[in-house]
Image (tube, helix red, strand yellow):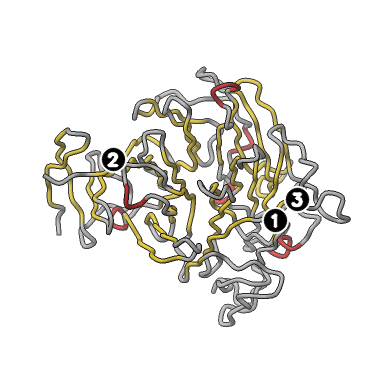
Amino acid sequence: MSARWMLGVVGGVGVAVAVLDAQSPFPTAGMPDQPVVVRTAAAIVKVSAIKGLVYPWALTFLPDGDMLVTEQNKSTLRRISKGTLVPTPITGLPQGITSTRRDTAGVDIVAHPRFAENHLIYVAYWKPKPNDRDIRVASVVRARYEGQPALQDVKEIWTSDSWTDGPSAARLVFGRDGKLYVGIGTPGFNEREGSAAAAQEPGSHLGKILRLNDDGTVPMDNPFIGKKGYKPEIFALGIRNAIGLAVHPETGEIWETENGPQGGDEINIIRRGMNYGWPIVTYGRAYTSDPEGKKSGLPPPNVQPPTAMEGMVEPVTFYKPSIAIAGLIFYTGDKFPLWRGNLIAGALVGMQLTRVQFNRQGLETRREAMLTELRQRTRDVRQGPDGLIYATTDMPEGAVLKLEPVTEP
């Protein structure tokens, strides 16, 4: 079935767009040049693609509405200005960001809450071990960006001492307390250094949510300060793979999206000193490629591990089967009024944006898979200063997707 066409009205301007339904064919390689309109349960959405990127990973907004975007396996940043990709990359990041393995090359970025004053950005990446580039360690770099083609005052402000050969993400978010929260996973499909069990080891940074000052030092009010055997940076533990972090707009709590193994993606509220269970409890199972569960630290794939245990925090909700849930936001804008307050997250394997509604008691009341027609692996999601939604596509012909509301004529 081919897509049909309609005249959409966006901001009072008529535009010709393709309208897709669930049965419409769509190329899996990348987005078309023309905008596409997709119907969802609570909005009709025009999706435009800002193209020219290769596996874009994360994005952050600057006060003027421009975006900085990271790409996997690249030690440069890209800037999108007024909806157009600037051709010249921004240099200055450490060269160690590049890797022979795409799953170790996730590069997160966040602007300082006072960027307008200090022009500081933060980048998290996996730093290679000397003489063995497949063994890596999480690192956070701070730099000053004032619009030049090169970053200034680039400084590595924090580096883990816990090495692993199987990282997937190191995520960043600034809390309302002004502290930098860092999510470091230990998924458990590696065989050499850093196993799933490290998530429960207080002397390892792996499988933890960490809390740092904005200069990379340790806040003295962290929950495990002075506790024997614990890394002082630890804020919470038992994390498999923190693939997204966001601050709840009302409560100020840190919310996390977490990839499960074979099933069991989680949405968690990260609270001080809590243990989130991995790999002792999970709604997922060992991969079928791990028949004895040795890599993942779980029972064999035909055995469901415990899903709850005293002292372990239950997820707010979970996905089984897995959609490979990714970056998330809580929508607070006015462009999509029926989405206000909803959690919206990307999904890699699920090729969608997942929208979750919660009631006043914090219980899930509705879940919708959106943009499945586009067949794009969506990784990071951000709300722009304009109230629109932007998402990166984890594709070789990658793009930043711009979501706008459409009023039918």
Relative to 124, does residue 79 appear above or below in the rendering? above
In the image shown, does 132 or 218 lie closer to the viewer?
218
Numbered disc 3: secondary structure: loop
Amino acid tagged 2: Ser
Tell me, yes or no, whether the two marked residues, 2 and 3, touch with CB atoms within 8 Å.
no
In the image shown, does 193 or 375 lie closer to the viewer?
375
Q: Which residue carries the number 1 mark?
A: 236
Residue 277 in the figure: left or right of residue 13: right
Residue 22 placed where, x, y %? 24, 61
Amino acid tagged 3: Ser
Residue 168 placed where, x, y %? 58, 52
Residue 185 placed where, x, y %? 64, 55
Task: Point out the frontmost of discs 2 and 3.
Answer: 2
The label number, if any, that marks residue 335 in the structure image: none
Residue at (57% x, 78% y) in the render: 301
Task: Point out the frontmost of discs 3 and 1.
Answer: 1
Going from N to C along the chain, the mark reached first, 3 or 1, is 3
Q: Which residue carries the number 3 mark?
A: 162
Residue 307 in the figure: left or right of residue 62: right
Q: CA distance from mark 2 to mark 3?
A: 41 Å
Crowdedness of circle 2 by 10 Å Cα count: few (<14), some, many (20+)? many
Numbered disc 1: secondary structure: strand
Q: CA distance from mark 3 to mark 1?
A: 16 Å
